[in-house]
Amino acid sequence: MGYAGPMRLRHLLLPLLLLCVLAPGLARAQAQQDGLLAYQALAAGDFALAEFYASRALAAGGLRPPDQAAVLSYRGDARRRMGRFDEAAADYAEAIEIGLPTEFAARVLNNRGIALFGLQRFEEAIRAYEGALALSPAFVEAMDNLGATWLRVGDARAALEAFNDAVRLDPENARARNNRGRAYLDLEFYDEALADFTAALDLGTPSPATPLFNRGIAHERLGDRAAAAADFAAAQQLRPDEPTYQEKFREYGLVP
């Protein structure tokens, strides 16, 4: 074997030293690129791919804390949309702990609330939504989600307060109008419930079977069984297999 003199050793070492200097920057650039790909996959609705890119970006290391928090939130969004609420909630919590800009943090807290609701950790979900609203007081989606969670735990008055705030800020929000109608139903304000369910339908809700069925309940409680039957029949045409509707469908002769 020939002797490697000083000049040859220098030629061998220089590329290695250069690689050592450049490697962290290259890894950071790749992680940032993966974070962007995760965001794009989320926007395209490919949640498995979004999780893959986000996980790879986080595993590479080298992301600045704000970028790391953002990528964690993307992975949380992907996992939440795939129904993996426990992992999503953990990702959101880590992102919040690292730190995010105010509006971004409000969105992440809202999404964490959705994940916690999916886990039936309702008190924690309420705190997450309230945290989102503390950061962004006009965040209508968080108001609506907060109201839905109050309804789920049986506090229709607290729910109504949240839905009133949402409708005041966004009167054409069909989801909030339907949800407020549900709170009115629970509080036995049937005329108000009827008006909100009708408004949700007039506003073009993407899920009309829900306010139709709910409006049928309101008509029934006001003693108008003919109007109730018409709404239940319309709901049955749209969602014939919805399990929570079957009892009413049978009662009104819409299914065997």
Image (spheres, rainbow, N blue to C red):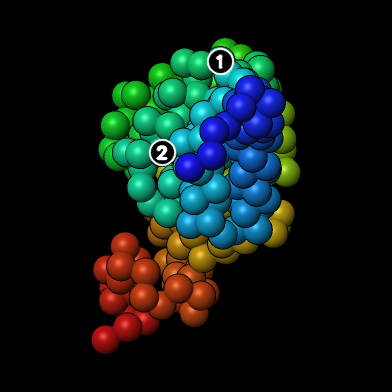
Query: Under tag 1, what secondary structure?
Result: loop
Residue at image location 46% in from the left, 62% down from the top:
213
Residue 88 marker: 2
Q: Quadrant of residue 30?
A: top right
Q: Tell me which numbered mark, 2 or 1, is placed earlier along the sequence.
A: 2
- Type of amino acid under label 2: Ala
CB of mark 2 within 8 Å of CB of mark 1? no
Query: Where in the figure is residue 134, as x and y percent of width and height?
Result: 57, 13
Quick check: 174 left or right of 252?
A: right
Q: Residues within 10 Å of mark 2 (few under 14, many from 20)?
A: many
Location of residue 85 with respect to 91 vertically, above or below: below
Q: Quadrant of residue 39?
A: top right
- Where disc 2 sits, the SS reads helix
- The three-letter code of the residue at mark 1 reads Gly
Label tally: 2
Q: Residue at x 51, y 65 (%)?
A: 209
Q: Position of residue 197 (x, y in %)?
A: 57, 52
Relative depth, front residue between 248 and 70: 70
* Residue on which the image places disc 1: 99
Query: Does the rendering let one see residue 145?
Result: no
| Residue at image coords 72%, 44% | 172
Q: Is residue 201 left or right of residue 228?
A: right
- At horizontal 69% and vertical 26% (from top left) the residue drawn is 7
Q: Name the spot of residue 92 as percent of width and height, x first.
A: 46, 29
Q: Residue 119's spot in the image, x, y percent?
A: 30, 40
Q: Which residue extends farthest front?
A: 2
